[in-house]
Image (tube, rainbow, N blue to C red):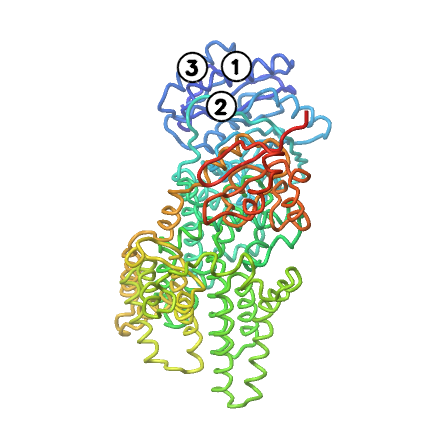
């Protein structure tokens, strides 16, 4: 027995041939193994290739080992069995199989595949043909259509993307278990991974040389028996850690960019660890909510994805599909990924932007708090207070636009604070650019632009006492910072003929979502109380009190000194939202006052000043306590305030609303019965149907379909095959208001679906 593996009944090495060795690891595949091995044996024999099949039982707790014993006994030497005494991981099983193939056979070609029956031997002949025609050293399969549940498909895309970014692999499907390799590529190859990173590591290492590698599609079939192990959170975390280990090995060996070695020797190792922790927390939270099915609970989340998708795929594609209600930056950022169906339908095409923004926000909170408090403990406390908040972790897992705004805000405030301290104009430029991006992300960014411009003017006046300096610096900052506002107003004028369409347009009016009976309207006290309750739900009372104490200490120590005023701008969002509630521009509900959650996420923006000033409070402890153990204890105590957050209010809100989701029956019906043709449907408030129905966005005629919408409303039979109408009394959409009294509707269309909320019609076919 060698290396915890037992080789039984293995044939002696054969003379060098042009045959094929199939290598497949097996773990808990008792019901799939025999059929998979027989498939390859039968196919290879029919093709006339000399062959062997090597199966590595990776310590399976079921009867996989016994099945393998039987296969070896009756194969006539064509099956070689290898048994690990304990489970060592997928990568270790693949390495054992490769080593066995090189040591026990002399065949030139190795096929690496799986034993679960999801890949068939029939595709091998095509790979051998491609290898011969292209004179390839390796033919890498990719799944034409992946026969897995949506979460596993999304995880596969993430895994492939991570392999490309970290290891430079070029495969479109890095973990596809169907790879035909020349043994010369594997001889002397030192593979180190024992988990799922074996596939990207293998491709990265063979891609370093001059090997000719081509890709070819293969079929992927549903599992007949058993459950995959790769979807468990433990396996996912282990896989990403193993990928990081492989990356570190390649960097150490000099096979990756030399500049990336600096990542392992950063000037601030604590910042590097904070960034890494944020990335891992972000990925873990997304996987958690993807498995829970909560990534797309917010209707606005699907609406953001629909806007981005329509830019590329609609009856009238183009940038005009960005519309004029929501600022465009999040939708533009989603364009590179929203084209891929799996990433689009899972929400990851938009969630990735939120996840990256979460990491940026955590990083800059650490930097700013460390500077304010002149202590890494302050930075750690601020970063952890924000990063561990369950409401933040949920929203960063969704395609909502709050996290991109938070990232822009923290970057802008950090650089403005650095400019106020150092006077470096590069910092002022960076602050203005980040502010401009904030104005193109959400309208709260416009408040930020105004607040920061006032701070620039104030600092300039206090520092130089010169109107000329005030004017110069204010213009220097403001021209860039407000360019996004000007561009959005100009867009509204150009596209809709109304510069204020974003404020009072047909689909932007506050009356669409704010009831005239809202008790917050006209009552500053009621509005302030509502927002205070939302703060308590989003951030927790202990964190708020600690942050308030930190703010008071900061204000007492620094007053309104020019070098200290930038962080105060984060407080401007509090009066803004109270005013928005009081004026009827935005609604908000909390259980204590209105009996339910609604728009409670608007209070989460105050997590930024909460984290920052809580971190400052940590640094305000007496100097004699600021030794490393005491700092760690203080930071831990600060982080403990996050544990007092009373649940995930930002998740409770959409769960409450979707529990009575009346759109689901119609969406499910369309998914089953829609076959072809254009569908007439108004967009607002029908986003769930459009997204979940499976109807291609290029087939949905809606109010944004330039020069198609009005003709379809006038004479639908001449333009569309399907009609969806929302018929809920008092909430009818424009399609129903225009067509319900039109006799052509019943003459030309058949009513196929109807409930208390909606109807679906299909055009009658001509005889």
Residue at 35% in and 69% down: 523
Which label belongs to residue 99? Answer: none
Q: Is residue 265 visible?
A: no
- Seen from the viewer's position, the closer of residues 297 and 514 is 514
Q: How many marks?
A: 3
Q: Is residue 365 left or right of residue 174?
A: left
Label 1: few (<14), some (14–19) or many (≥20) C-alpha neighbours in 10 Å? some
Q: Position of residue 334 (x, y in %)?
A: 57, 51
* Disc 2 residue crowd, few under 14, some 14–19, many 20+, Cα 10 Å: many
Pointer 3 residue: 69
Q: Is residue 362 visible?
A: yes
User: Disc 2 designates what residue?
Assistant: 115
- Mark 3 vs 2, N-terminal side: 3
Mark 3 Cα shell of 10 Å, populated few (<14), some (14-19), many (≥20): some
Circles 2, 1 touching at the beta carbon (< 8 Å): no
Between marks 2 and 1, how big is the CA–CA gap? 11 Å
Question: Residue 427 in the image: x percent, y percent?
Answer: 54, 73
Between marks 1 and 3, how big is the CA–CA gap? Answer: 14 Å
Asked whether, in this view, residue 717 is left or right of residue 694, the answer is: right
First of labels 1, 3 by sequence position: 1
Earlier along the polypeptide chain: callout 2 or callout 1?
1
Q: Reply above or below: 542 against 463.
A: above
């Amino acid at each position: 027995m060698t290396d915890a593996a037992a080789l039984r009944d293995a044939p002696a090495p054969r003379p060098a041939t042009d045959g094929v060795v199939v290598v497949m690891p097996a773990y808990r595949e008792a019901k799939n193994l025999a059929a998979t091995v027989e498939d390859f044996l039968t196919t290879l024999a029919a093709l006339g290739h000399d062959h062997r099949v090597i199966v590595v039982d990776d310590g399976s707790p079921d009867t996989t080992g016994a099945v393998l014993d039987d296969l070896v006994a009756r194969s006539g030497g064509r099956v070689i069995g290898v048994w690990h005494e304990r489970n060592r991981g997928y990568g270790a099983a693949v390495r054992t199989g490769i080593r066995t193939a090189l040591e026990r056979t002399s065949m030139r070609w190795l096929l690496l595949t799986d034993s679960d029956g999801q890949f068939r031997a029939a595709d091998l002949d095509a790979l051998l043909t491609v290898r011969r025609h292209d004179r390839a050293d390796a033919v890498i399969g990719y799944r034409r259509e992946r026969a897995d549940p949506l979460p596993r498909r999304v995880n596969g895309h993430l895994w492939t993307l991570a392999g490309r970014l970290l290891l430079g692999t070029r495969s479109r499907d890095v973990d596809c278990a169907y790879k035909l390799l020349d043994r010369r590529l594997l001889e002397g190859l030192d593979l180190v991974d024992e988990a799922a990173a074996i596939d990207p590591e293998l491709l990265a290492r063979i891609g370093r040389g001059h090997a000719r590698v081509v890709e070819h599609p293969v079929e992927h079939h549903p599992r007949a028996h058993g459950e995959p192990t790769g979807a468990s959170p433990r396996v996912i975390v282990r896989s990403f850690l193993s990928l990081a280990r492989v990356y570190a090995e390649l960097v150490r060996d000099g096979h990756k960019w030399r500049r990336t070695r600096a990542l392992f020797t950063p000037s601030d190792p604590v910042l590097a660890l904070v960034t890494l922790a944020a990335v891992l927390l972000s990925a873990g939270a997304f996987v958690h909510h993807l498995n829970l099915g909560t990534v797309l609970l917010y209707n606005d989340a699907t609406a953001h994805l629909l806007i981005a998708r329509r830019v590329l795929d609609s009856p009238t594609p183009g940038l005009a599909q960005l519309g004029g209600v929501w600022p465009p930056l999040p939708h533009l950022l989603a364009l590179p990924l929203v084209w891929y169906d799996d990433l689009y339908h899972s929400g990851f095409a938009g969630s990735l932007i939120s996840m990256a923004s979460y990491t940026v926000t955590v990083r800059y909170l650490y930097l700013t708090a460390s500077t304010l408090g002149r202590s890494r403990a302050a930075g750690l406390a601020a970063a952890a207070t924000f990063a561990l908040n369950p409401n933040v972790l949920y929203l960063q897992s969704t395609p909502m636009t709050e996290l991109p705004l938070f990232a822009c805000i923290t970057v802008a405030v950090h650089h403005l604070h650095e400019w106020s301290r150092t006077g470096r104009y590069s910092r002022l430029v960076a602050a203005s650019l980040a502010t401009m991006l904030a104005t193109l992300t959400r309208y709260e960014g416009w408040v930020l632009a105004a607040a920061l411009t006032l701070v620039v003017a104030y600092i300039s006046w206090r520092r130089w006492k010169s109107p000329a300096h005030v004017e110069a610096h204010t213009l220097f900052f403001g021209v860039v910072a407000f360019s996004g506002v000007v561009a959005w107003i100009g867009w509204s004028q150009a596209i809709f003929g109304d510069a204020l369409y974003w404020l009072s347009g047909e689909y932007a009016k506050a009356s669409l979502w704010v009831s005239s009976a809202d008790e917050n309207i006209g009552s500053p006290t009621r509005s302030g109380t509502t927002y205070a309750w939302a703060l308590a739900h989003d951030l927790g009372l202990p964190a708020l009190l600690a942050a308030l104490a930190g703010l008071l200490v900061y204000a007492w120590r620094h007053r309104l000194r020019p070098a200290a005023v930038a962080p105060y701008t984060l407080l401007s969002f509090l009066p803004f939202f109270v005013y928005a509630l009081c004026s009827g521009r935005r609604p908000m509900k909390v259980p204590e006052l209105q009996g339910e959650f609604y728009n409670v996420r608007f209070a989460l923006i105050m997590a930024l000043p909460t984290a920052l000033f809580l971190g400052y409070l940590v640094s305000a402890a007496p100097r004699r306590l600021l030794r490393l153990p005491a700092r760690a204890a203080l930071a831990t105590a600060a982080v403990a305030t996050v544990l007092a957050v009373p649940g995930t209010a930002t998740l409770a809100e959409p769960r409450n609303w979707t529990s009575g989701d009346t759109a689901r029956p119609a969406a499910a019906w369309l998914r089953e019965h829609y076959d072809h043709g254009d569908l007439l449907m108004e967009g607002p408030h029908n986003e769930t149907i459009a997204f979940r129905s499976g109807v291609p966005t290029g087939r949905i005629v809606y109010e944004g379909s330039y020069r198609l919408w009005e003709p379809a409303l006038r004479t639908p039979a001449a333009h569309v095959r399907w009609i969806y109408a929302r018929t809920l009394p008092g909430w009818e959409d424009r399609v129903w208001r225009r067509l319900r009294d039109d006799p052509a509707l019943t003459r030309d269309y058949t009513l196929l679906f109807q409930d208390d909320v909606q109807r679906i019609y299909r055009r009658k076919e001509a005889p």
